[in-house]
Image (spheres, coloured by chain):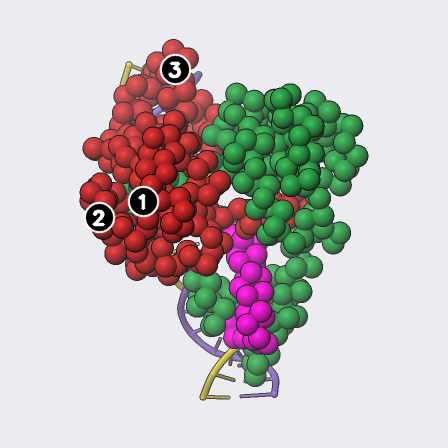
Chain colours: A green, B red, C purple, D yellow
Amino acid sequence: MRKIPEKTIQRLIIYRKILNDLRYYGETSLFSSKLAQIAGYSPVQVRSDLMVIGYQGTPARGYDIDDLETSIGSFIDAPKGEGIAIVGIGSLGKSMFEYCYWKCPNLSSILLFDVDSVLIGSKVEGTEIHHINDIDKVQEMEKTRVAIITVPPENAQDVTDMLILAGIKGILNYTPVRLKVPDDVFVEEMDMIVPLEKVAFYARQS
Amino acid sequence: MRKIPEKTIQRLIIYRKILNDLRYYGETSLFSSKLAQIAGYSPVQVRSDLMVIGYQGTPARGYDIDDLETSIGSFIDAPKGEGIAIVGIGSLGKSMFEYCYWKCPNLSSILLFDVDSVLIGSKVEGTEIHHINDIDKVQEMEKTRVAIITVPPENAQDVTDMLILAGIKGILNYTPVRLKVPDDVFVEEMDMIVPLEKVAFYARQS
DNA sequence: CTTTGTGAATTCGTTCACAGCA
DNA sequence: TGCTGTGAACGAATTCACAAAG
């Protein structure tokens, strides 16, 4: 498959969320201009993004909300749902878990790991915390491709190495450490320091 | 001042962090290739970013770490330090506060707000939680330009409106809501759902 | 020689302009 | 007429290629 730009994927995900909201309010179809206005992009941008997934609208009615949502879903989502692992069950890790647990319908499983033996065996919302060293013993890791890292900086690289050995191909990195990973592993930086300083900079400009 | 691209600002912030780390390990100078390799960009990229802030290196020794760090700092940072407000002191808000409290040296003040009257008056690490309705009564808001929003989605827009009235010009939005703000207010989306789905998508491609 | 600084070239992403269709 | 779909034009961001300097 041809490589799809990250920005397009991001926008498609945003479109889907909007479509889902609109469907909830009983809407059945919309034009690119409407979707664009809600999402904050141009109508042409929306149309060319939808070209990427090959979805066709009609000049008369625009796009069918239900249909389009499903199309984006089948393009973006894993067919059988996604399994994720959260490593580092401090206050941030716990927030992430609760958020995913309640808000992410397409997650088929959430595994919890930590490096601190004190936490091992205890549970969050009925889900057990495993030691990261036992990662190979956890059955569900087989179908887990994505990990969220919320450990202290000093453990970040070690934990990453273990995750990659266990087959992880995508990482949300909440630590300020720049992780070393092979080319086929996708890392998204989630640390707040860079955005915080960026926002502060632009806030001062205006 | 000419408008600086967001990406350049982000990279400068990353460079500074790296320089800070290297200085800690006793390094005194480096070449663009070294900085590029650590940061994960090309050497040309590094050099042209540094051109933006007008910093000059020498072919013989490259860039002086101490000097360059200071130069980036005086370009990026507010001269008198930055005041921020965190709105929504749930588990995520608390994590953010602790992180900022310990890890952000350039923050001159951190204010805490919530919409839930039950929390009002209680303290986190010795810092009092105010009700968002009392925002105008809080003296330090005068020097606060940046806010972190970690409230439930249903309160997000209301809280935003109040913050903007109180003079906030930059927002880190941890909610999944797309906030409506005036043109001179800078919003950075911090919700994890979009990045999580994005990472899952690319993890599946590889 | 190696490295910086930088105009030119290239690549990537967005928008324009218009053909095609209800 | 409205709108969608899409090649062409444009603009932004990155990389190339090379002059200048120790």
Image quarter where the N terminus of chain B lies is: top left
- Which residue in the protein does label 2 denote? B137
Q: Earlier in the sequence, mark 1 or mark 2?
A: 1
In the shown orientation, is residue A38 left or right of residue A205? Answer: right
Q: Residue at x 49, y 54 (%)?
A: B176
- To which chain does the residue with label 2 belong? B
Marks 1/3: CA distance? 38 Å
**Residue receiving disc 1:** B130
Of callouts 2 and 3, which one flags the residue occurring earlier in the amino acid sequence? 3
Marks 1 & 2 on one chain: yes
Secondary structure that dominates the magenta span: helix
Number of the label disc, if any, that sits on residue B24: 3
Does residue B173 belong to the magenta stretch?
Answer: no
The CA distance from mark 1 to mark 2 is 10 Å
Residue occupying image coordinates x 59% and y 37%: A148
Q: Amino acid under label 2?
A: Lys
Which region is colored magenta?
Answer: A4-32
Q: Please state the horizontal and vertical placement of residue A131, each as a whole percent of the image.
A: 68, 25
Question: Is label 2 or label 3 in front?
Answer: 2
Residue A136: image x %, image y %? Answer: 76, 27
- Asked whether the residues under the numbered discs 1 and 2 touch, taking CB atoms below 8 Å apart as contact, a structural biologist would say yes
Q: CA distance from mark 2 to mark 3?
A: 42 Å
Q: Position of residue C6 (x, y in %)?
A: 30, 37
- Residue B59 visible in the current orientation: no
Please tell me if label 1 and label 3 are on a single chain. Answer: yes
The answer to whether one can see residue B108 in this image is yes
Name which residue type carries label 1.
His
Circles 2 and 3 in contact, beta carbons < 8 Å: no
